[in-house]
Amino acid sequence: MNRPPRRRLHPEARKLEIVEAAERLLQANGGRARVEDVVREAGVAKGTFFLYFPTWDDLLETIRQRLVSQFDTAYPLPTEVEGPVDWPGLVESQALAFIEFTLSRRGVGEAVFHSDFAERRPLADHAIHRLAAVIRAGQEAEAFGPVDPDATGRLLYAVIHEAADAVAGCGDRAAVQGALQHVLRRTLAP
């Protein structure tokens, strides 16, 4: 059997091919993808996979960091330089963005945030710290009441995450999002 010659790629481009192949499979199949599936999808040898990712968990770690970075890039937080900020509106828009982002990447998210991998390699509380930072900034602007930003950020993240799960479970999206907005406003009210 004559195979077409494999095209030469820069190592980072080859690594990205593997990551994107894994993301497609995880999106379609959740955590049921295996190394064999990924190398087939990426069109690389198994040895090439292990050159870039010594373990399956290393691949999942890369994908998880990529998801976090994609969210941060797609939904950046404002800076003081940009002018006045609608802090309550920002929290609500970030929460709704999280729901949308989570739903659009459900299979991948299950594999990297809700699997035995996530238990073996817990993610630092990036989303919680991000939310707590917004609460602190909103308090400094006197837009939020005197709540503990870290504890409140943790609890609100749990509520936002549960809202995403409720919508994914075929819940009434408008009702869930309306209830979420109500909880956010009441919790952070000055």
Image (cartoon, grey):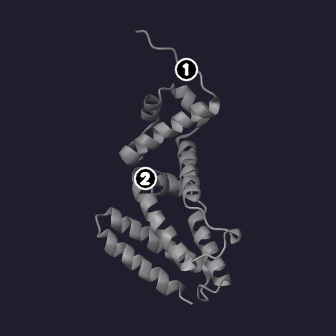
Label 2: state its secondary structure: loop
Q: Is residue 22 above or below residue 124?
A: above
Q: Residue 84 sits in which quadrant?
A: bottom right
x 61%, y 68%: residue: 130
Q: From the image, tell me which residue sits under label 1.
A: 7
Q: Residue 102 sits in which quadrant?
A: bottom left
Of 124 and 138, the residue lying toward us? 138
Q: Residue furthest front?
A: 83
Total number of numbered discs in the rendering: 2
Q: Is residue 75 above or below residue 11?
A: below
Q: Which amino acid type is shown beneath numbered disc 2? A: Arg
Q: From the image, tell me which residue sits under label 2.
A: 105
Q: Position of residue 128 (x, y in %)?
A: 57, 69
Q: Position of residue 85 (x, y in %)?
A: 61, 75
Labelled pair 1, 2 in contact (Cβ < 8 Å): no
Q: Position of residue 181 (x, y in %)?
A: 43, 78
Q: Which amino acid type is shown beneath numbered disc 1? A: Arg
Left or right side of 115 for 84 = right
Q: Residue 141 sits in which quadrant?
A: bottom right
Q: Is residue 2 above or below residue 153?
A: above
Residue density around tag 2, few if under 14, some if 14–19, many if 20 or more, within 10 Å: some
Compute the Cα span from label 1 to label 2.
30 Å
